[in-house]
Image (tube, helix red, strand yellow):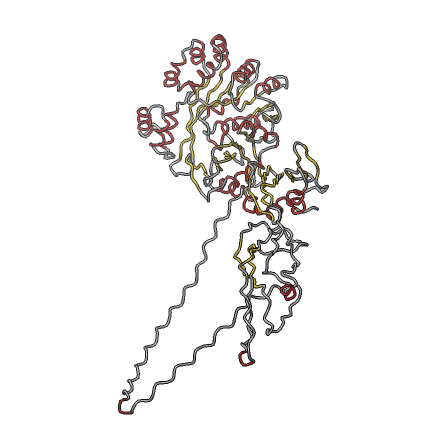
Amino acid sequence: MNTLEQLLWTFEQPDLEEIIVATSTAPRGVRGTMETPLADEVWDTDAILGALVGFGGSRHVEELSSTPRTWTARVVGLGTISVSATQVRKKVEARFRLAQPVAKAAPPQELKGPARSAKADSVFPVLTAPPPFETSRLPAQRVIPSAPASPPPPPPSSPSEVAPPSVTRGPSLRVDTPTRIQRPVHHTTPLLFEAIEAGPSIELDLSPLSPLAPPIARPAHAPPPPQLLPPLPPLPPPPPPPPPQAAATAPAPLPPLPPLPPLPPRPAAAPAVAPAPPPPAPTFETLLANARAAKASDLHIIAGRPPLYRIAGELRANGPVVSADQVERMVLPKVPDRLVNVLVEQGSCDFALSDRTHGRFRVNVSRQQTGYKACLRLVSKELPTVESLRLPEGIGAGAHHHQGLIVFTGPTGHGKTTTMNAIVDLINRTTSHHIITVEDPVEHLHPKKKALMSQREVGTHTASFGSALKGSLREDPDVIVVGELRDVETVRMAVAASETGHLVLGTMNTPSAARTIDRLVDLFPPGDQPQIRLTLAGGLRLIVSQRLVPGKDGSSMHAAFEVLPGSMPLSALIRDNKTFQIPSLQQRGKALGIVRLDESLARLVVEDKITLEAAKAVAESTTELDSLIKALRTPGARA
């Protein structure tokens, strides 16, 4: 396979502007608007990442993403090259451009004048022998001639005047050398990417040696000899000792100094404490396991924040901060292929995730200011049942209807889907009906029991809720379950199905039962509202509104229900557009199976499951809540 070095040297070809290296594609070059192949070998992802690390991008390779990472490096003998690299899933692409080519070497300046002589050439036949390193790509050395040499001294007049051997200084050459280590021409190591800077000037003495100095033999490829300096002048003789003085005038000897006290022993140096290693980055599986262990309802993975777990209605941070790259590596591979374009174009997508160890999750992935974010709703491993949720009797009775409309309402994240799936499981266990569910996405998977289950997911098995409901009417269904009644088309098809002999179950995000009826009517144009009131008056079977309240232990949630079954008084109020009188009907309609939200909250407070403050936070009337709690605590009232 061609190495990155061989590809980069193709920049010496004329008109080559860019080199592109991509996964599963042969390297190619760009000349103007045309792309031409540079080699036949196909590069894989590991080879490209390894080449980018050798190109000085180890820090950038760890942060590759769909956003281009750009840096530059200096290639010895070629120039400055900029690279722009991206990575989308398992595909890597790198683009190289020659940003600043190296300047061509200028020929060395020829020495002129009396400073150069034939005798100098005889002493130094080779100034610098070419070493076995690549020197053709180095910048040209600058040669600066110095001042002419002084005339040689006159010959001695007699043998006694012969001076000791010395070296006569002549003209010198000043050579500016680059401060870098040369590399062999035929190397197998990665390219050297470095910046070349001017180094210190070196003075080389090129004058002929004195005739009295013996010749110096050195190999042809040896470096130039060190600079020869004239011998140092002889040291002056030591001064004569002072004359001895008389013994009578000699000073008395000084007493000896007392010995120094011993030094105290040095304390042993404490061993250096190594810094604690940084905590390892959490994995996606670890976060799922922690969410299950903490009994959280939701898990938030957001760039720039530690993982957040919603426990008992509150978000609690636990663990190290997760970077944007870590979120991408954890979340993006989980996005189904069919939703990749949706995430890119719309910035958000929803899907279900199944894990053999940690169970099933409803996932939302979106983009925000610091990067990607994932919100995972934990779906219980065990299918919820009416008995496990301890639902009121009026809710379980809704499974016995053969036709009509049942709506489960409440704020987002308060268990509407869980309660609805408990009713679906009851129908699946006790009847032989054909149940069709349309969800986005499918949360609970219903196993095969007595009934026939057909679960469809929007985006995977059908285009929309409306098209799925329209098609389901021809599939001989008995029960139709709609994940969410969110638009006019879906509500119109659901109401029409409830009129044609089917039991339709759906959810809505409304705060109370009375507001649910108003929302269903207000979705339609004013001209269609009288007709929809008549349809709801005759087909509405049950409205269940619920709220999840934090438990007294701080780690559990308890459901408070509002149950409004269909009845003749309720039908009359809907038909006559007097839904504002529904709260009055709820106060006096206990015999009709009506359960108010404040009554359910009061019972949870009396049973010591929730606190009074938590109950008042969601109660419709705090004054009436206090009265109901006082009545329930009266002896004999609970029975």
- Vertical order, 162 against 500 (above or below): below
Residue depicted at 59% across the width and 58% down the height: 113
Count of marks overlaid on the render = 0
Q: Position of residue 531 (x, y in %)?
A: 50, 9
Whether residue 64 is situated above or below residue 638 in the rendered picture: below
Q: Quadrant of residue 314?
A: top left
Task: State left or right for residue 273 relative to residue 137.
Answer: left
Residue 453 vertical placement versus 333 (above, below): above
Quadrant for residue 619, please give it: top left
Instruction: Assign the C terminus to one quadrant of the image.
Output: top left
Q: Residue furthest right?
A: 40
Is 370 or 20 nearer to us in this picture? 20
Residue 453 falls in which quadrant of the image?
A: top right
The one of 515 and 138 positioned closer to us in this rendering:
138
| Direction front: furthest residue | 157
Q: Residue at x 54, y 70 (%)?
A: 153
Please indicate whether residue 535 sits to the left or right of residue 478 in the image: left
Q: Estimate the x, y position of residue 185 in percent, counting from the top left.
A: 67, 54
Question: Where 367 falls versus 150 (above or below)?
Answer: above
Residue 243 in percent (x, y) is at 34, 88
